[in-house]
Amino acid sequence: MRIVKLDAIDSTNSYLKQLITNETVDDGTVVTANFQTNGKGQMGTQWNSQASKNLTFSVFKDVRFLSVEHHFYISIAASLSIFKTFKLFNIKNVTVKWPNDILSENKKICGILIENIIKQNQLQSSIIGFGINVNQSEFNNLPNASSLRLISGYFFDLDEILHFILKELDYYFELLKRGDFEYLKEEYESYLFRKNKPSTFKNTEGELFSGFIKGVANSGNLQIIMEDKILKEFDFKEVTLLY
Ligand code: BTN
């Protein structure tokens, strides 16, 4: 497996995206950076991370074997690889906040940004970017963020964590290749933050509503049982689950 280690770059996702337009890149190629000058988060946000304290990396996956309808399973495999690694390091109370934030003690420790390349309605490749708060100990103005260090009190070796994540990612991609969708979804749903608990959501108009998370559809839509007991599905842009 090829690992490209960079000192500083705008964004490891952007770097990999550029790389695949210039050359043939092997499945599983990883790009890490000690510092990103323009780290990208979900929905056009920025991902800020102190230099050399955290893991910021992207993995290139050839996903031609997967149908577009199953694209959310990339997110499931990526989330489970982090979930499993955190468990291995004895991190407490790990959950997955839909669609793919990994929390410990209800605080965000890892964010994932997946950028898929689709041609003629066929998935080609996926760039999976991981931002993991590892040894950083201050998060100014980010009350919902934390790090492995703050949660556990320990310092972590970044390379060691990366090694385990890549191993878990390989494992979950093998399941994906075998088409074990039901198993993957069941595992993902069993770790969902606030599943079957009364929860508050915000819609695109900024209005709050309550409901119970039931699970996810194959499309990745969140299934919520509303106050009138009707089951509704929401996509990522339509709803935010509050902490
Ligand atoms: C989120 O908003 O939760 C997703 C954050 C993803 C951040 C990672 S850091 C490595 C990779 N490169 C980027 O520019 N973003 C992702």
Image (cartoon, rainbow, N blue to C red):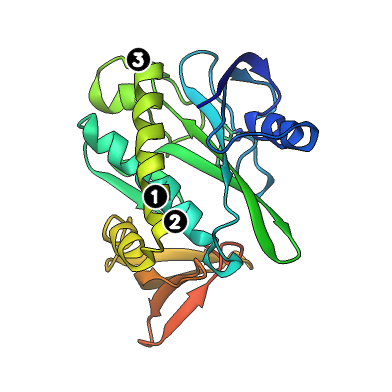
Q: Residue at x 52, y 65 (%)?
A: 70
Question: Mark 1, residues whose alpha carbon is within 10 Å: few (<14), some, or many (≥20)?
Answer: few
Indicate the amino acid at tag 3.
Asp
Give the residue at mark 1: 174
Q: CA distance from mark 1 to mark 3?
A: 27 Å
Seen from the viewer's position, the closer of residues 172 and 234 is: 172
Question: Mark 3, residues whose alpha carbon is within 10 Å: few (<14), some, or many (≥20)?
Answer: few
- What secondary structure is found at the residue carrying circle 1? helix
Indicate the amino acid at tag 2.
Lys
Instruction: Of the two numbered discs 1 and 3 on the same chain, state the one appearing first in sequence.
Output: 3
Q: Residue at x 24, y 37 (%)?
A: 87
Seen from the viewer's position, the closer of residues 216 and 26 is: 26
* CB at disc 1 and ligand 1 closer than 8 Å: no
- Eye-nearest disc, 2 or 3: 2
Are circles 1 and 2 on residues that touch, CB within 8 Å? yes
Residue 87's disc is none
In the depicted structure, whether residue 165 falls above or below residue 220: above
Which image quadrant is residue 187 in? bottom left
- What secondary structure is found at the residue carrying circle 3? loop
Are circles 2 and 3 on residues that touch, CB within 8 Å? no
Seen from the viewer's position, the closer of residues 177 and 39 is: 177
Q: Position of residue 56 (x, y in %)?
A: 53, 26
- Eye-nearest disc, 1 or 3: 1
Give the residue at mark 3: 157
Give the residue at mark 2: 177
Q: CA distance from mark 2 to mark 3?
A: 31 Å
Q: Position of residue 195 (x, y in %)?
A: 30, 64
